[in-house]
Image: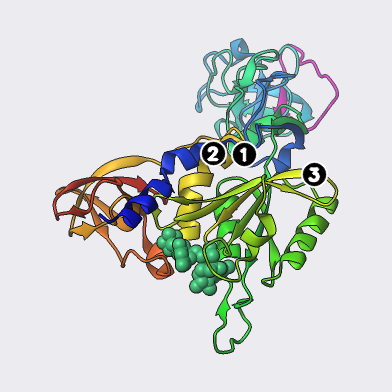
Amino acid sequence: MTGADTAQQNALRPVDEHRRRVAGLIPAPRVVEMAVDQALGRVLADDVIAPQSLPGFDNSAMDGYAVRAAETIGATTESPVALPVTADIPAGRTDELTLEPGAAHRIMTGAPMPAGADAVIPVERTDGGTTRVAIGAQVSVGASVRRAGSDIEAGEVALRAGATVTAPVIGLLCALGLAHVRVYAPISVVVLSTGSELVTPGTPLRHGQIHESNGPMLVAALTEAGADATAIHFVPDDVAAFRARLDEIIATTRVDLILTSGGVSAGAYEVVKDALTGPDVEFVKVAMQPGMPQGSGHYRAANGTRVPIVTLPGNPVSAQVSFEVFLRDPVRASMGLATGRPRITAELTTGLSSPKGKRQFRRGIVVADEQGTRVEPIGPPSSHHIRFMASANALIDVAADVETLAAGTPVEVMLISE
Ligand SMILES: Nc1nc2c(c(=O)[nH]1)N[C@H]1C(S)=C(S)[C@@H](COP(=O)(O)OP(=O)(O)OC[C@H]3O[C@@H](n4cnc5c(N)ncnc54)[C@H](O)[C@@H]3O)O[C@H]1N2
Ligand code: MOO
């Protein structure tokens, strides 16, 4: 190794150190009260105590007749018990009824049981009469009755803090009569792409132009991670325009994090770097491939607000891998969501090489079958191969001190499609 090589290696920051630096910038969880029907995917900040029992009242589990069970003893199809039907109780009837001895009330599923009744005989076991009913089977006490509180009693813990709001959780909260719930707020992320070569997808290209892909990709990655992300139309390679756009956004909306891609390496027109260089943002090279040039710190807006900012490299694979390695976990942690992509060991199907001194995250496809768990590296290592990133289900994590790996070697992989 030459002296220059050594100097460059020394300048590279280890991946884990940069992970800690980025994690330290992401805001702590913030609790908000949210409408239950908006809370899908959020995490409960507090235990939820049932404000009412479920069911709230004894009710029928079947369409049929509310009876006193003792009055049906001995009833059979051949020798039914006949009772007058003295009331009709559809679901939603709100007056309180009493079943007098020697009578039946026609009752529907979910309708409140009349006082005095202790069982329901399903309509199929009767002649379905509306003024008088012939009951063709005996029922035992409690048959087809859903007792008040049999699902949950008022005062019980219905849901624990830390639970993720799923569709059934929304169902339970609504059933308990709750319209709002305390959850961790989604963090609000503004995603900016820079580069004069970028053109909106759907628009024809001129020579030298490309379609902007990082912005929508990072918004999607953030959304999948649970954040509230918005892509801001990319700005040209112009420092003043870049700052003006950010200042305008910060003055008008809540921004918890700014995420940029592009413009951070060594070129002559690195707008992000040029606009942010100063004591609040540091630009470093991380010992990683892809994703070497990285920036992080705070953006000081014109109105004095300091907003965390993370600047990812522009190559699409670098941007996406950097998101996985540095941002996904802290972003999820800031909303109380579970962190850590699953990591497994898999056998390499083909050998690969990795740059000395850099931790490499190679795209791969993990296959698990009776022959074991294997990972096939797909595509070359360079960071413009978005095609292979799009079909990978794993990142092969090659340690910085490893330069070659033979086929058959067990490697650690991070599963990126859940
Ligand atoms: N002399 C050096 N050149 C480069 C270095 C270096 O250390 N010294 N680092 C290389 C590495 S590694 C990376 S990664 C890239 C990072 O470059 P930037 O972050 O400055 O990004 P740009 O130059 O703006 O773009 C790089 C590449 O990605 C394309 N790009 C950018 N934004 C988007 C977008 N929103 N959608 C799709 N594609 C995008 C852009 O057109 C470029 O092809 O620098 C190397 N160079
Ligand atoms: O380090 Mo860059 O992110 O590979 O192409």
Q: Which residues are magenta?
A: 92-107
Above or below 386: residue 61: above
Three-letter code, disc 2: Arg
Viewer-closest of 401 and 148: 401
Residue 174 placement, left or right of 360: right
Q: Would you say the residues marked 1 and 2 are in contact, meaning their CB atoms lie under 8 Å apart? A: yes
Q: Would you say the residues marked 1 and 3 are in contact, meaning their CB atoms lie under 8 Å apart? A: no
| The quarter of the displayed image where residue 217 is located | bottom right
Name the colour scheme. rainbow
Residue at the disc numbered 2: 21
Three-letter code, disc 3: Thr
The image shows residue 47 at horizontal and vertical percentages of 65, 20
Residue at the disc numbered 3: 305
Three-letter code, disc 1: Leu
Residue at the disc numbered 1: 25
Which of marks 3 and 2 precedes in the sequence?
2
* 103 drawn magenta: yes
Work out how far the residue at label 1 is from the one at label 3, CA to CA, in angstroms.
14 Å
**Mark 3 CB lies closer than 8 A to ligand 1:** no
Work out how far the residue at label 2 is from the one at label 3, CA to CA, in angstroms.
20 Å
Work out how far the residue at label 1 is from the one at label 2, CA to CA, in angstroms.
7 Å
